Amino acid sequence: MGKFWNLFSSWEEAEKVWDQGAHEAAQATPLKKLKVLPQIPGITKETAPHLRWKGLKYLLSHDADKKIRNHILKAPFRYFWRYLSSFWKKKPYQRKGDFFLYGLSSFEEFQKKMGASLLVIGFSYCQKPLECPSGRFTDQCLRDPNHPVCRQCDIGKTLHALPNQEVIPLLIPTIHYIGDKIFEIVQQNPKREILFLITACELTLEMFGDLGNMAGIKGIGVRLDGRICNTMKAFELSEVGIKPGLTVVTKSTQEQILALLKACRSDACV
């Protein structure tokens, strides 16, 4: 399916038409929204200690088909060294609000690299609308601008606004799914720089930041809000598809994501 943005002569025109269609779809087919509930706190005090160790333990102990281990064994010394180099840092990222920068110092650096890199853009499945026509706990995404649910979905809008470069979109059901895909993409493109932009809950960004550094890729993790996982128990349930609540990218953060893509479509990235 072609990108909706490519039908228009300017970003502003494309976004205006998309948003008008989203408004009309919301009037005709309103989606279930987040209930007004007390703000879910971030990672709980009980969960916070030794999160990166917990992440490593979870990654290895739940690698039932050994995909992650098999990827690592293809270059064990390289991956082991990268992991140690990342792990011994106080944090594997730099944080700027809802954005976690891995191997990058600024948004400007991301924009400069974007045009020459293979971009992996991923979205956590729990960000999908409850009415998602492709289903929620799945890596499928219809992203049909003529479908009333897709038209109201931030994921659909973002995918249709992507620059005209080689991009690999991923809908992420589990941490092992994205880990397997990242290693696979890196190993299939040894001469390409891989750049990622991925949405996830803060717990996931904290626990598994070293994984991206180990794979040797740079990018941005975007913190989700709403009915997030803030305990290991909630995270483990979400990894098997038990996630009745919705997570969202806040409006201001979504605007920043689109601004990054707009800047790239407006210059040599396109």
Image (tube, rainbow, N blue to C red):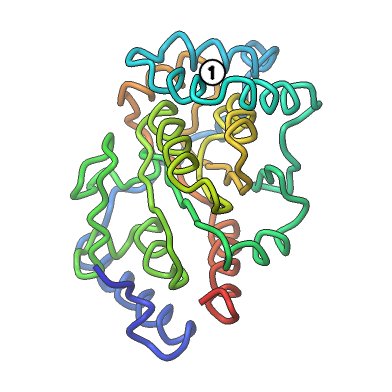
Identify the amino acid type marked 1: Thr
Q: Quadrant of residue 165?
A: bottom left
Q: Is residue 33 above or below residue 62?
A: below
In the rendered view, does 138 fall on the left or right side of 15? Answer: left
Q: Which of these two is toward me, 130 or 241? A: 241
x and y, in percent, of residue 15 in the image: 43, 78
On the rendered image, what quadrant is the N terminus found in? bottom left
Q: Is residue 16 above or below residue 130?
A: below
Residue at x 38% of width, y 56% of height: 155
x and y, in percent, of residue 128 in the image: 34, 46
Residue at x 38% of width, y 53% of height: 169
Q: Which of these two is toward me, 176 or 226? A: 176
Q: Which of these two is toward me, 163 or 21? A: 163
Q: Which residue, given by chain and number where applicable, does mark 1 sit on?
A: 231
In the rendered view, does 126 fall on the left or right side of 269? Answer: left
Residue at x 53% of width, y 59% of height: 254
Residue at x 37% of width, y 34% of height: 245
- Label 1 SS: loop
Q: Which of these two is toward me, 188 or 212? A: 188
Q: Is residue 13 above or below residue 2?
A: below
x and y, in percent, of residue 69 in the image: 46, 17
Mark count: 1
x and y, in percent, of residue 57 in the image: 54, 10
